[in-house]
Amino acid sequence: IATAGCNFNCKFCQNWEISQTKPDDNYNYALNPEQVVEMALQTNSRSIASTYVEPTIFAEYMIDIGILAKKRGILKVVHSNGYINAKPLDDLCASLGAACIDLKGFTEAYYRELTEGTLQPVLDTLVRLKQKGVHTELVTLLVPGRNDDMEQIRAMCHWIKTELSPDVPLHFSRFYPMYKLKSLPPTPVETLEAARAAALEEGLRYVYLGNVAGHAGEHTYCPQCGVVVIQRLGYQVKPVAFQDGRCTKCGQPIPGIWKQPEIT
Ligand code: SF4
């Protein structure tokens, strides 16, 4: 679910045609929160995601959907840039099942130059999500020559490990030329692999590669015995050594949301 608009202007935005415009300038469906939840129930959808543009710009709508969804046992999830004040974030957390937050880089200079936003509020959001106990995953788009310095990546991973948890999943995503960065090449796969190796060395336990369908970095590995517990190919997900939130080979718990919320 999305409207149009965003509080950032990322030079690499893949959805810039809707993120950098207004709802009035787009073709829209009119759906109130009750209709959204009803549609989810009719289609046996187990979750409702706010994504594509920046959901904080329609926070009230998202919160109302989340409150209704929670009552009906549907998980409300959000993919956000994390640039949100504490009060609306607290309101959102009350009905939020899980969050995927873009940690786009790890310097203020990168944020200012590439996104027109700032880093510190995003870090504050991540700490607050942890305090609220919301399952949170991170995505870092690696843009060639801009945020792919391995020392910077290591510093970011160290911060994640010490300020959040080594169990927070981190997804390094492959950049493809678009919007205002058409002149750059796609991220070399070797760079993504080096970033993943650095993150694992820094102590993060669930590090993934995204936008590289078929790569072994898409799978979930048991941090204890190393077996592939969940296999992925693009959007296909297959548990292979995983049951009831644990590795079936060694019994190691794998953090995540594995059960549908109860109807309240
Ligand atoms: S925050 Fe997301 S939606 Fe907004 S401009 Fe950046 S990439 Fe696009």
Image (spheres, grey):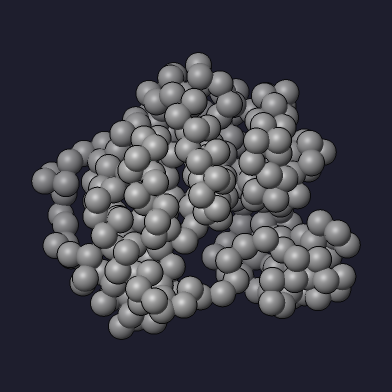
Residue 107 left/right relative to 162: left
Quarter assignment of residue 31: bottom left
In-front residue for pair 25/73: 73
Residue 36 left/right relative to 252: left
- Given the current orientation, which residue lies at the most extreme left position? 24
Q: Which residue is at a point 37% across and 51% down the rendered structure image?
A: 92
Task: Report x, y in % for residue 194.
Answer: 75, 37
The image shows residue 28, relative to residue 121, as above or below, that is below
Task: Report x, y in % for residue 196.
Answer: 73, 42
Taking the image as drawn, is residue 190 in sight?
Answer: no
Quarter assignment of residue 263: bottom left
Residue 221 left/right relative to 238: right
The image shows residue 264, relative to residue 146, as above or below, that is below
Q: Which residue is at a point 49% across and 26% down the rendered structure image?
A: 119
Q: Which residue is at a point 75% across and 65% down the rendered structure image?
A: 253
The image shows residue 211, relative to residue 11, as above or below, that is below
In-front residue for pair 222/20: 222
Task: Report x, y in % for residue 164.
Answer: 64, 41
- Quadrant containing the N terminus is bottom left
Taking the image as drawn, is residue 116 in sight?
Answer: yes
- Quadrant containing the C terminus is bottom left
Q: Which residue is at a point 70% across and 50% down the rendered structure image?
A: 167
The image shows residue 56, relative to residue 258, as above or below, that is above
- Given the current orientation, which residue lies at the most extreme top position? 109
Task: Report x, y in % for residue 193.
Answer: 73, 42
The number of numbered badges drawn on the structure is 0
